[in-house]
Image (tube, coloured by chain):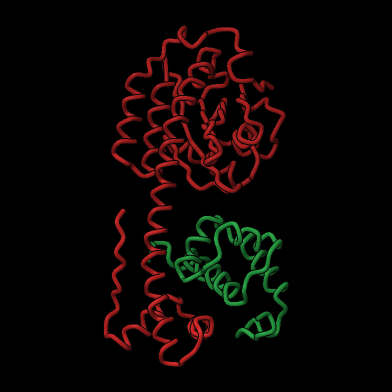
Chain colours: A red, B green
Amino acid sequence: MTETQPSEQIPVAAPDEDHVDLTDFLEHLQELLVENADIREFLQDLVTMTAKKLTRNGNTIACGVTVIRQKKPVAVADSDPLARKLDDIQNSFGDGPCLTALRTRTVTHVPDVHEEMRWADYMKAAACTDVGSILALPMELNSTAEAVVNLYSTRSHGFSHEDIAAAERITATGAKALYLALKIAQLRDARENLTAALASRTAIDTAVGIVMAQNRCSRDAAFQILVSASSHRNIKLRTVAEGVISHVAGDRNIPTAFEE
Amino acid sequence: MNAEPWGASGHHGEFDQRLRASCRFQVGNISLDRLWTYYFGIGGNADELALEAYLNELLTLAPGQMELVDTALKELSSNGRTEPAGQ
């Protein structure tokens, strides 16, 4: 029954009092960013490192991350099959501690799965697995997307105050790197889409000019002819345009001079 | 210009066409950015703000532009379904 606010309510362990050294964690995240790894690869390394960092004294921690965009999970990564199974269960129910953490933007703690009263359906399904306790931490991604880190321990009461504080630090650090990775991916996509749009527009404009000359019609009318051809034959407008051009010039590749 | 029949949309009012585009956009899980870029790529001339206003039913576009928005929505959603590898 604990819904903990980040840091303030946790009496023990100010950031420098817990004993988790994050230097290698930071270095690895930085490397991933520099290598321009894709988001899935990035998340996979993030969960693996997070799980490793938090596993102590034989208390094995499994870690999963779910990234949500426009209310749908777009990327999921898990450190092991247990985390995968629990994340899948939760995403299929559309409810559970991790999704609650995401919605309320607060750290959500389930000290003992078998005694938890909230999320009855999810807990019933979770109790059939080896999980004993769950800790879910939302990530701050400056509205590029939303993400939550899900930590699963096979023990009940597997997360001490120190563990929770360490998990918060790791999550906050991971969130900054994930934010950058998402931002880079977003900008890369936008650039690729614009490049494709410029190339496509060149072909279509050329075809419009050809149709105007052949039919002695206005630009609007020429567009209309191409759009009708595209929708009646269920062929992409660009493909229709390329057909028109190759019919005249025998050339399907219309280069667009575009310096990035 | 509004009186001119434009292909398949000739039987519908422009408000119907706008409403359909708006609904299609909302259920399509496509970002405005992505839609505008694609629409620009197939020859669209309205800027992103005008497109957004159109999809929120605040503004009308020229009939030819509305056709292009429909085409962009159609081609983008069929991309998502049949060509995951980005053909």
Q: Quadrant of residue A256?
A: bottom left
In terms of depth relative to the viewer, which is nearer, A5 or B57? B57
Left or right, A80 with reference to A102: left
Residue A147 position within the rendered picture, expressed as x and y whole percent measured from the top left: 53, 37
Residue B8 position within the rendered picture, expressed as x and y whole percent measured from the top left: 62, 84
Name the quadrant of the N terminus of chain B: bottom right
Q: Residue at x 48, y 26 (%)?
A: A171
Left or right, A195 with reference to A112: left
In terms of depth relative to the viewer, which is nearer, B67 or A121? B67
Q: Is residue B77 visible?
A: yes
Q: Quadrant of residue A43?
A: top left
In terms of depth relative to the viewer, which is nearer, A39 or A194? A194
Q: Residue at x 71, y 61 (%)?
A: B58
Numbered disc total: 0
Relative vertical location of residue B33 with respect to residue A81 in this rendering, above or below: below
Relative vertical location of residue A161 with respect to residue A154 in this rendering, above or below: above
Residue A139 position within the rendered picture, expressed as x and y whole percent measured from the top left: 53, 31
Relative vertical location of residue A91 with respect to residue B15 in this rendering, above or below: above
Name the quadrant of the C terminus of chain B: bottom left
* Residue furthest bottom as drawn: A215
Left or right, B9 with reference to A229: right
Q: Is residue A123 visible?
A: no
Relative vertical location of residue B71 with respect to residue A13 in this rendering, above or below: below
Residue A48 position within the rendered picture, expressed as x and y whole percent measured from the top left: 39, 31
